[in-house]
Image (spheres, rainbow, N blue to C red):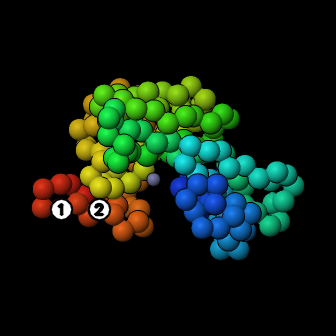
Amino acid sequence: MPWFKGNIHSHTTNSDGDSSPQHVAAWYKDNGYDFVVLSDHNHLSILDDAEKNNDKWPLLIPGEEVTVRKIGIDAAALHIGGIALSEVIMPGSYESNTDGINDIVSKINKQDGLASINHPNYQWWVSSDDIKHSTEKIWAFEIFNGHMHANNYGSLNSMSTE
Ligand SMILES: [Zn+2]
């Protein structure tokens, strides 16, 4: 098997990205990517005729970034990537991060999708214990995210994502 270059976490104007889905897909094609997931928040960004347009877009895999909140706390949320989904998964509010991870990841797994914990250190939303205590099969988590609040390298009191 050859290696394939892809991105499983990107945003478009269908959520908080600044470019259209068509433009984002074309950028990845122009920059040598084999596949991309337009993982807009709580939204499946699918382009019509994606298979017919493989000369201008890479392979487009349907997916989304699902928002998980703690009950009563609107400002903080964690994000779970759902890759290769057939139906959108709605955001939810839970007693704990682990409850939220278990519920959303199980919904992703039921669709035979792949679940990824995105930017776990973003504003310190997710701890390693939240992930360790999850009973569902998590496929991956992000080690690096380019957002300025991703805290990839940890702090004196918190582990790095690596
Ligand atoms: Zn996110």
* Up-down relation of residue 60 to residue 109 (above or below): below
The image quarter containing residue 17 is bottom right
Looking at the image, the residue that sits furthest to the left is: 156
Please report the residue visible at 26 percent of the width from the left and 52 percent of the height from the top: 124
Q: List x then y, in percent, for residue 131.
A: 31, 38
Q: Residues within 10 Å of mark 1 (few under 14, many from 20)?
A: few
Circle 2 — which element?
loop
Crowding near the residue tagged with mark 2, few <14, some 14–19, many ≥20 C-alpha atoms within 10 Å? many
**Residue at the spot x=29%, y=31% of the render?**
96
Q: Left or right: where does residue 27 sit relative to residue 131?
A: right
Cβ–Cβ under 8 Å for marks 1 and 2: yes
Q: Looking at the image, which is closer to me, 22 or 137?
A: 22
> Which mark is drawn over residue 138?
none
- Type of the residue with mark 1: Ser
Q: Which residue in the protein does label 1 denote?
A: 155
Q: Quadrant of the C terminus?
A: bottom left
At which x and y percent is residue 46?
A: 72, 49
Q: Is residue 45 above or below residue 106?
A: below
Numbered circles on residues, count: 2
Is disc 1 placed on a helix, strand or loop? Answer: loop
Real-space Cα separation, disc 1 to disc 2, in angstroms: 8 Å
Q: Quadrant of residue 32?
A: bottom right
For the point 18% across and 54% down, the residue is: 158
Res 3 seen here? no
Q: Is residue 34 above or below residue 132?
A: below
Which x, y percent locates residue 90? 55, 34
Residue type marked 2: Asn
Query: What residue is at 80 percent from the left and 67 percent from the top?
Result: 56
Q: Which residue is mark 2?
A: 151
Q: Is residue 16 visible?
A: yes
